Image (spheres, rainbow, N blue to C red):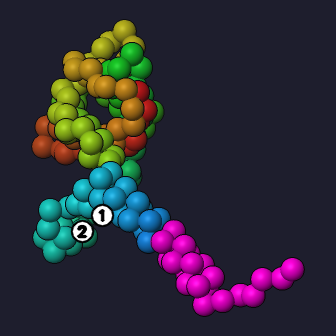
Amino acid sequence: MTRTFTGRHMTMILVAFFGVVIAVNVMMARFAISIFGGEVVENSYVASQHYDRWLAEARAQVNAGWRADTTGAANRLSVSLTRRGVPAPDVRLTATARHPLGRLPDRVLTLHWDAASARYVADQMLPSGRWLIEIIGLRGTQRLRFEDEVRI
């Protein structure tokens, strides 16, 4: 006994198909809105005005041999800051830790020199997870800037 394919069958297939498509789109939109705030810079036009200067500063920093390596052990950020491979204990460092999805508030960390490990260590602890770290260093009139990602 064969059944005939009717308009009612086609209607149910179309309703089911588009129901699934709409449900997936709504779910993906809700995820996108809830996990990413969407703001990378406050004002992209103003940021674009400084772009060439930022590139020149980064080139000068690399040419001077500065390097910062970050690690996160025991929920503390530590930074190995070197110039041409030699540790640099005379730089004043601060770091801003940003959660990549914006779920946790930004944290400003002060780092102090630990002579035993030849590293800068943060006084404050960070919650476990992935953090985007912006490190600002001041040495006299020289300003250093590094960005890195660390998992704690």
Point 41% across, 60% down: residue: 27
User: How far separated are the C-alphas under marks 1 and 2?
Assistant: 6 Å
Q: Main secondary structure of the magenta part?
A: helix
Q: Residues within 10 Å of mark 1 (few under 14, many from 20)?
A: few
Boundaries of the magenta span: 1-21
Tell which residue pokes out farthest to the bottom in this image. 7
Q: Is residue 19 magenta?
A: yes
Which of the 4 image quarters holds residue 123? top left
* Coordinates of residue 141 in the picture (x, y in percent): 12, 43
Depth check, front residue: 86 or 75: 75
Residue identified by numbered label 2: 51
Depth check, front residue: 71 or 31: 31
* Coordinates of residue 38 in the picture (x, y in percent): 26, 61
* Coordinates of residue 54 in the picture (x, y in percent): 25, 61
**Callouts 1 and 2 close, C-beta under 8 Å:** yes
Amino acid on which disc 2 is placed: Tyr
Q: Quick check: 39 above or below 134?
A: below
Is 113 left or right of 18, judged from the image as shown? left
Is 110 left or right of 22, judged from the image as shown? left
Amino acid on which disc 1 is placed: Leu
Residue identified by numbered label 1: 55
